[in-house]
Image (cartoon, rainbow, N blue to C red):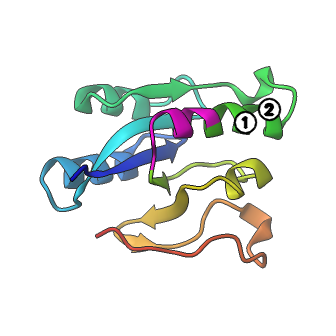
Amino acid sequence: MRKTRLAVFASGSGSNYEAIAKACSEGVIDAEVVLLVCDKPGAYVLERAKRYGTECFAFNPKEYGSREAYETVLATMLDEREVDFVCLAGYMRIVGKVLRKHPPLVVALVQGCTRHSGCGGLRREALWRYHTLC
C-alpha cells in the first residue's frame, strides 16, 4: 500500500515544513512529502526541502495575473503528483477558491496541532474539514 502523499505550502524559514518532513522520514507520520510550494523564491524553507530531497516549486505571485492563475498551476501540480493532503505550514497567502475546491484535503499544521491559518480574514467561512496527521 502506498504512503499518504503530502504537499507542504510554506512562505518562510521552514521550521514547520522540517517538523513534518522529519516526522515522515522517522515514521511518526505514515506519509511522504512529495512537494513543497513556496511563494517566496528566496525563502530558507527551500534549503531545508533540498536537504530532505523534496521537490520544490517556488513562485512569485506577482508574475501571475491573478490568484486564480497561480492556484490553477498549483492545482495541476497537486493532481500530477497525486497529492492526498495539503499542509499549510506557515503559508502566508489567503487560499482562494481554486485550491479550496481542489480534491486534496487541506490541513493546517502548527506545532503538532491542527488550526486553520490559510484564510486570513475569511475565518468565518467554513472552508475545510480538519484532520490531525500526528
With 53 as the anchor, is 105 left or right in this view?
Answer: right
- Residue type, numbered disc 1: Thr
**Where is residue 85 shown, x and y percent of the image?**
46, 55
Q: Is residue 81 magenta?
A: yes
91 vs 13: above or below = below
4 vs 80: above or below = below
**Where is residue 51 shown, x and y percent of the image?**
24, 28
Q: Can residue 43 be seen here? A: yes
Task: Return the residue nearer the eye: 85 or 60.
Answer: 85
**Where is residue 56 shown, x and y percent of the image?**
44, 27
Residue at 21 percent across and 53 percent down: it is: 1
Q: Secondary structure at mark 2?
A: helix
> Dot 1 corresponds to which residue?
72
Q: Is residue 114 magenta?
A: no
Q: Which quarter of the figure has residue 110?
A: bottom left
Label 2, residues with CA under 10 Å away: few <14, some 14-19, many ≥20:
few
**Where is residue 22 shown, x and y percent of the image?**
21, 49
Residue at 62 percent across and 34 percent down: it is: 76
Task: Return the residue nearer the eye: 7 or 41.
Answer: 7
> Dot 2 corresponds to which residue?
69
With 34 as the anchor, is 3 left or right in this view?
Answer: left
The label shown at residue 82 is none
Q: Which residues are magenta?
A: 76-83
Magenta segment's dominant SS is helix
